[in-house]
Image (cartoon, rainbow, N blue to C red):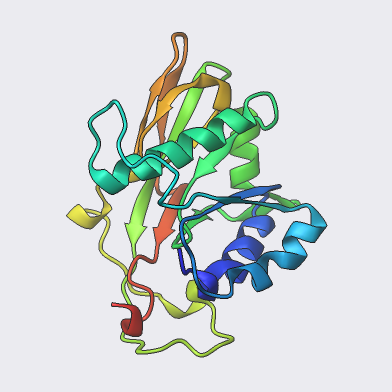
Amino acid sequence: KNEARWIKEWIEYHRLIGVEHFFLYNNDGTDQYREILAPYIDEGLVDLISWNSDSAPHHDSRGAAYWVGFQHSAFNDCIERLIGVAPWVAIIDMDEFLFSVEGSTEGRTFFQDLLREVSPDVGTLNVWWRNFGTSYIWRLTPNALITESFVHRAHDQSIANLHCKCIHRPEAISYALVHSAFLKNGYKFIEIDPLRLRINHYYLGDRMMC
């Protein structure tokens, strides 16, 4: 919702590390997101799904809080769409960037290699947060990049970093939560070493957004 400022960088960044398609769920956005997304939709790179608050459920049978249930329903809708379509799906927000600490080799990224090599009985990869602040920037200039501008973050042992987000094998998921999932029988989860792959979480944006 109303993340138009960050959409282009978020998509282009994740394309560079090997993401092949995007399913974006818009919950009542009122900014210029459609204008920004139009070329990506025309290219066939982005599917845009309207998930407005009048129709999507806010609660679920797990007893989730009001808006968390709204998230859960979107996550699980996406996973169901991708069974038999995509081998993996990362459930992340517009302020979260998958970051391969090990970088790239021979035109490939660690992110791509990891997904190719993981055991077939692994249904979920838990990727740990690293939370970034505003780096004392009041307002990003129009052409400034989040990933280059926000350079100060919480230290590794900070309680701010005690959450992960997930990359799921769609057919392995019984029910996805925000930071975990219930797996079907025969599947397990593994935790990814944040010194190899992590999620850079720019949850504050610039100081104008705080």
In the rendered image, the vertical position of residue 96 relative to residue 83, given as above or below = below
Q: Looking at the image, which residue is at 27% across and 56% down?
A: 156
Image coordinates of residue 12 in percent, x first then y, are 66, 64
Image coordinates of residue 25 in percent, x first then y, are 53, 51
Nearer to us in this view, 40 or 204: 40
**Residue at the front extreme of this rendering:** 54
Task: Please count the marks in the image.
Answer: 0
Q: Looking at the image, which residue is at 68% across and 24% down?
A: 84
**Does residue 100 appear anywhere in the picture?**
no
Nearer to us in this view, 61 or 194: 61
In the rendered image, the vertical position of residue 12 relative to residue 102, given as above or below = below
Based on the displayed image, in which of its 4 quarters is residue 64 positioned? top left
Nearer to us in this view, 79 or 51: 51
State the quadrant of the N terminus.
bottom left
Image coordinates of residue 172 in percent, x first then y, are 51, 20
**Residue at the right extreme of this rendering:** 43
Q: Looking at the image, which residue is at 52% across and 16% down?
A: 121
**Residue at the left extreme of this rendering:** 159
State the quadrant of the C terminus.
bottom left
**Does residue 89 appear anywhere in the picture?**
yes
Q: Looking at the image, which residue is at 65% across and 30% down?
A: 87
Q: Is residue 93 left or right of residue 164?
A: right
Image coordinates of residue 184 in percent, x first then y, are 45, 14
